[in-house]
Image (tube, rainbow, N blue to C red):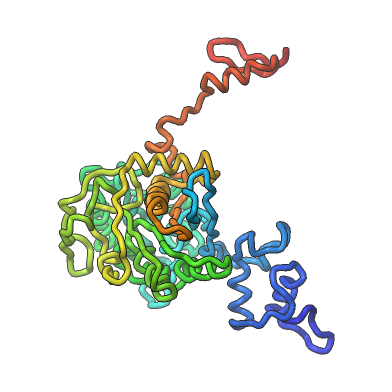
């Protein structure tokens, strides 16, 4: 890369953008391009803050629409307040995606793939069965693309997710709790069969895991390489299995010695049971899995083993299956917020719990990465926030009373000025 453009040569817009990045300190003059300028500019445009010389440098360009913001999520080190000494633990914060979850990747992958294949056309309605994050992501892409969107969601999942999807223009069909995950899938299939709508099939669609193989996995490999660290352990849970299947393939291809730990709820050990899921011709489950039981880790482990997960080469990818107690997932999510400032959901707490437990027994010098799939703000009505009050507690009331003005004390008249 030149330090400045030549007066004799008119630089292209892409090259001018790259030259600006040199001026901002994002790139160094003399850097050899290892990718075409346009591809390099796209990759740099979404670079995390640590890649810029200073805050204020900008992201290196303008975005045509918000789908360009999907991916390139940051990896953050966990301090010794949580991580045991002698090992390094990191979190990949998927809530940096535009609608705050890893499922933004899935939605872009499936919709763009269907458009390319001609299966999804302008004016059609897009349907999905989801615990919430996929529905929010699908609703986001549908809003941007101009498709109508219908989401089928089982009753137990948090009400704030329903409201977010409706805010994004989707219609949300709530299915009975007793029907579990298979019930919402059946409802979505019925609606598509009757109306000729497009069903995303997140649990069966190979575009799901292929997108993670092309993006999530390489991001992880490249970020640790750029940081001068050798990743020794990667920890993830599964909802559809797309992250594990796709990113796992990319990580194992680049780092064959990296141990992959797959977590699932202790209360719903579907993989641990060894019992396969019986499938329909399209790969969807015939019935609820016998090992399933209700668990608090929303977004993880529906009441069947997803085909996307089942299709993964488990013998090549999974080095360890780790059961997660529900209360430990909740407690770890709270600890991440209170001690690290990382506001993630119960699934992120579950993944980090597994990572921290692995860290206790891993060899000194190990480098462990856990996935944080979404934001804690999706869980305001769930057990994650059950003991977090909205009103002031005794300590807060004591602080409020410590100065004379603007006091709002229960049972007393409000005080505006002393």
Where's residue 208, x and y in %?
A: 37, 67
Please give the name of the residue rendered at 16% of the width and 56% of the height, measured from the top-left corner: 287
Where on the picture, by quarter, is residue 259?
Answer: bottom left
Nearer the observer, 247 or 164: 247
Residue at the image position 37 percent from the left and 62 percent from the top: 126
Side (left or right) of 73 relative to 157: right
* x then y, percent, for residue 198: 34, 65
Q: In front here: 295 or 335?
A: 335
Task: Give me the residue at 72% from left, 59% from top.
Answer: 54
Quarter in which the N terminus is drawn: bottom right
**Residue 270 or residue 142, whichever sits in front:** 270
Q: Position of residue 395 (x, y in %)?
A: 55, 21
Q: Quadrant of the C terminus?
A: top right
Q: Measuring 42% from the left and 77% from the top, which residue is drawn there?
A: 116
Determine whether, in the image, residue 246 is placed left or right of residue 278.
Answer: right
**414 over 162 or under it: above or below:** above
């Amino acid at each position: 890369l030149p330090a400045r453009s030549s007066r004799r040569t008119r630089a292209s817009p892409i090259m001018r953008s790259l030259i600006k990045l040199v001026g901002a300190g994002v790139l160094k003059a003399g850097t050899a391009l290892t990718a075409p300028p346009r591809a390099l500019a796209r990759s740099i445009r979404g670079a995390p803050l640590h890649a810029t010389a200073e805050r204020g440098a900008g992201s290196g360009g303008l975005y045509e629409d918000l789908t360009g913001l999907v991916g390139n999520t940051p990896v953050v080190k966990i301090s010794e307040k949580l991580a045991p000494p002698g090992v390094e633990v990191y979190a990949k914060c998927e809530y940096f995606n535009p609608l705050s979850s890893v499922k933004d990747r899935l939605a872009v992958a499936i919709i763009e793939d269907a458009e390319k294949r001609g299966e999804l056309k302008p004016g059609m309605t897009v349907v999905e069965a989801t615990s919430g994050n996929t529905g929010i992501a699908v609703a986001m892409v549908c809003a941007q693309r101009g498709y109508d969107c219908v989401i089928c969601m089982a009753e137990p999942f948090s009400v704030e997710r329903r409201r977010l999807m409706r805010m994004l223009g989707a219609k949300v069909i709530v299915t009975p709790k007793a029907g579990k995950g298979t019930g919402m899938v059946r409802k979505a299939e019925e609606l598509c069969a009757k109306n000729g709508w497009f069903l995303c099939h997140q649990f069966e669609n190979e575009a799901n895991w292929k997108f993670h193989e092309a993006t999530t996995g390489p991001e992880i490999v490249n970020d640790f390489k750029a940081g001068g660290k050798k990743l020794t352990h990667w920890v993830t849970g599964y909802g559809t299995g797309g992250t594990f299947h796709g990113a796992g393939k990319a990580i194992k291809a680049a780092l064959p010695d990296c141990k992959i730990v797959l977590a699932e709820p202790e209360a719903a050990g579907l993989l641990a049971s060894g019992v396969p899921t019986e499938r329909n011709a399209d790969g969807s489950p015939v019935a609820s899995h016998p090992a399933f039981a209700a668990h608090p880790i929303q977004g993880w482990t529906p009441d069947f083993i997803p085909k996307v997960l089942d299709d993964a080469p488990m013998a090549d990818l999974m080095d360890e299956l780790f059961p997660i107690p529900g209360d430990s997932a909740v407690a770890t999510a709270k600890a991440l917020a209170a001690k690290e400032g990382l506001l993630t959901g119960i699934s992120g707490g579950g993944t980090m719990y597994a990572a921290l437990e692995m860290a206790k027994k891993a060899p000194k010098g190990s480098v462990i990465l856990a996935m944080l799939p979404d934001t804690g703000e999706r869980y305001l009505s769930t057990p994650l926030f059950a003991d977090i009050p909205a009103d002031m507690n005794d300590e807060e009331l004591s602080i409020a009373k410590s100065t004379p003005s603007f006091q709002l004390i229960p049972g007393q008249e409000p005080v505006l000025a002393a």
